[in-house]
Image (tube, rainbow, N blue to C red):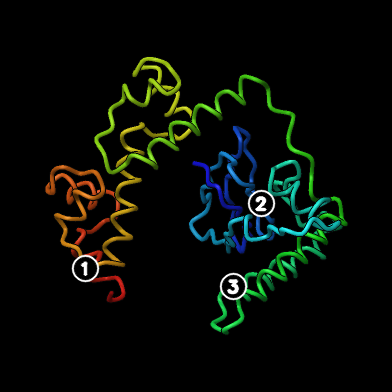
Amino acid sequence: MYKRQVEILHIIKGSYLFEINLEEHLLQQGDLCFLNSEDLHQITGQTQCAMHDVLIFNPRILDFSYPDELEEQVISPFLHRKLNFPHILRTNDERYCEILPLIQRLMELSIQESSDWYVRCKLHLLKLLQVMYQKQLLLPADTSLSSADKQKIDRYKAIISYMEQHFAEPVTLQELADLIPCNSQYLCRFFREITGTSPIQFLISLRTEHACVLLKDTTKSILEISLECGFDNVSYFIRKFRELKGCTPREYRKQSPEV
């Protein structure tokens, strides 16, 4: 999938297969991984004990209205994806020892409950950006992708974006196919090649994740949540929810903190 947020991952133990913009990398313990806004990606644990920390933020929080040197040379190019984080920073990179403590401190600040945690995180994030710029770790936008790969990524993003906007409505394979455009058979092959699953299964997963949020954060009935998430049959919703989450919606709600 792709997201509009930026993610920074630190591999604590084990290994992960990291797929980004149609390329695969094996991440090992200690490695740092950066997902820029709208990168097409998937990360899969390769060992049973695999564990990682992750920091997620919307890059727009760095925006400044005053066009000073920092804004013009670093922040604005970063926000407009003219400069990007490197996808991977390995432990054997000489710059790793300077970057890791900054990221660890940023992750610590993000989970603190102090009243000024947001301000401190933002200032520290700016510090991280400045150091990475100084160490030449903010890289020009990737131009290595072939036109065919760029087209494939753009088509995939169009499909995912449509699903995210319309998951609560009836969505057909032909509607999704018309976005590319192609026929429904090609759409299924194309989508499975990238995600390993079908468009409909992905849509069900998307609806289920939204249902999880509603189950945790609202007191709406199971029927109401089912309809709001695009399931027109509550029995089907419960069955699919159990398949994906290993429990019923009601059991999931009981396991979650009270609203």
* Residue for badge 1: 219
Indicate whether 259 appears above or below 68.
below
Q: Quadrant of residue 68?
A: bottom right
Depth check: 173 or 31 in front? 173
Local SS, label 3: helix
Quarter of image, res 82 = top right
* Dot placed on the residue nearer the N-terminal end, 3 or 1: 3
Relative horizontal placement of residue 191, taking residue 3 as reference (left or right)? left
Q: Mark 3 sits on what residue?
A: 110
How far apart are the two marked residues, 3 and 1, measured between alpha carbons?
Answer: 28 Å
- Whether the residues at callouts 2 and 3 have beta carbons within 8 Å, the answer is no
Q: Give the Cα separation between the discs numbered 1 and 2.
A: 37 Å
- What residue is at 40 percent from the left and 35 percent from the top? 162
Residue 124 image position (x, y, % from top left):
72, 70
- All told, the count of numbered labels is 3
Judge by depth and name the residue closer to the eye, 77 or 47. Answer: 77
What kind of residue is marked 2? Phe
Is disc 1 in contact with disc 2, using a CB cutoff of under 8 Å? no
**Sequence-wise first label, 2 or 3:** 2
Which of pointers 1 and 2 lies earlier in the amino acid sequence?
2
C-alpha gap between disc 2 and disc 3: 17 Å
Mark 2, residue position: 34
Q: Amino acid at mark 3?
A: Ser
> How many residues crowd around disc 1 within 10 Å: few (fewer than 14), some, or many (20 or more)?
few
